[in-house]
Image (cartoon, grey):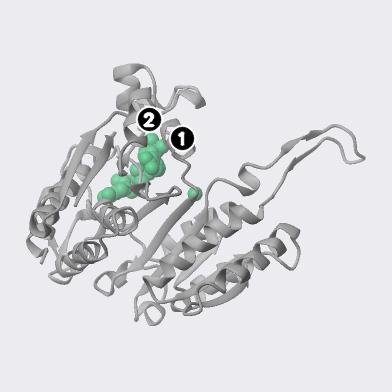
Amino acid sequence: MKFNIATIPGDGIGPEVIEETIFVLNKVAEMHGHEFSFQEVLAGGIAIDKTGKPLPEETVEICKNSDAVLLGAVGGPKWDTLPGDQRPEKALLGLREVLGLYANLRPAVLYTALKEASPLRSDIVEKGIDICVVRELTGGIYFGERGRKKEGKMGEAAYDTEAYSVGEVERIARTAFEIAMKRDKRVTSVDKANILESSRLWRSVVIEVAKDYPEVTLDHMYVDNAAMQLVRYPQQFDVIVTSNMFGDILSDEASMLTGSIGMLPSASLAEGNLGMYEPIHGSAPDIAGENKANPIATILSAAMMLRHSFQLDKEAQIIEEAVVKVLEKNYRTADIMSKGMTLVGTKEMGKLIVEELK
Ligand code: NAI
Ligand code: MG
């Protein structure tokens, strides 16, 4: 099969991790008879330097007309003094908006080979962690009505509104159940239905959608309890589906259980098959250009691209298994290095993963 991929290397370590990821994807294509065609586009700081804008029109057009977008990272100290709406990060928000990326998927996987990296007690992480947080990304309190009110005994007030429609909840719930079908078939819907009316609607819609997925076990959890349970007993979770703000917080919490920012991928999905795939880390200016960056988060993001945008589940799994094998052979980049392991650079890590693709 043939797919068009828009690549956005961006800034800092972005180009280095994207290069290794393309190397892996080309090998997968060659082994399995697919054709991936890559079109590199500008966004972030490098786009500001070359065009004056963080997200040029041409980039938007090419991304819209691709089968998927693969992004490294944007930003860096060079552009830190620019005003908010002209900064490199504006490119990410702009792409989310124009591509209609309503679902953010953040898997938090703790490989047993890396369990010493977790801040959790070793008896808790003994069995590994494998959670996927599915966060609603284009609704809720971050997009609701907001404002300020002058009146009131206690002085000026400010408000933000959490609002969800049936359609918005149905769409994100369906995404979560579809993902669960490809995993351990368990969904935990996180809300605050004991207090919030929007959460009561959320819960009732999720229950309705669940009827279409009889094989999937659904349970519900209040967000405060979910924050606690993630640390107490993370293995109880498979897929967590939740609103924009709760997902923002819980996905950061879940990812830190694994302790290694250089390992964590993400996907943001639009309706249809289009998605944007990127590591959760930033441009790491402190190590840029030094062949030190861990490319695994980006390589695993590409595996998510194969699974969610191209329906190439088997090929995605092959990449994930290759990563596990390299870790089990004790190769480590500096960010996940520990005693007795073999230290490798960005390029060596890419090469080792390619060698394990089978
Ligand atoms: P960061 O994630 O870039 O770096 C935090 C720390 O983790 C640094 O010490 C870095 O060396 C290390 N690190 C990150 N990724 C790594 C990797 N793959 N391998 C090894 N070590 C890695 O976050 P920071 O320093 O807060 O932000 C740096 C720049 O990146 C800023 O301009 C920020 O705005 C931008 N940024 C961009 C994001 C994106 O493009 N999605 C997300 C987060 C930050
Ligand atoms: Mg956040």
Residue 334 sits in quarter: bottom left
Classify 145 as above or below 271: above
| Residue 13 in view, yes or no | no
What residue is at 33 percent from the left and 59 percent from the top?
A: 260
Q: Is residue 33 above or below residue 96?
A: below
Q: Is residue 182 above or below residue 95?
A: below
The residue nearer to you, when weighing 211 against 113, is 211
Residue at screen point 86% across, 36% down:
155
Q: Is residue 343 left or right of residue 163?
A: left
Label placed on residue 60: 2
Q: Residues within 10 Å of mark 1 (few under 14, many from 20)?
A: few
As displayed, is residue 122 above or below residue 295? below
- Dot label at residue 63: none
Secondary structure state at the residue bearing disc 2 = helix
Please give the residue where the numbered disc 1 appears in the rendered image: 98
* Three-letter code, disc 2: Val
Q: Secondary structure at mark 1?
A: helix
Residue 228 horizontal/vertical position (percent)? 57, 71
Q: Are marks 2 and 1 in contact (CB under 8 Å)?
A: yes
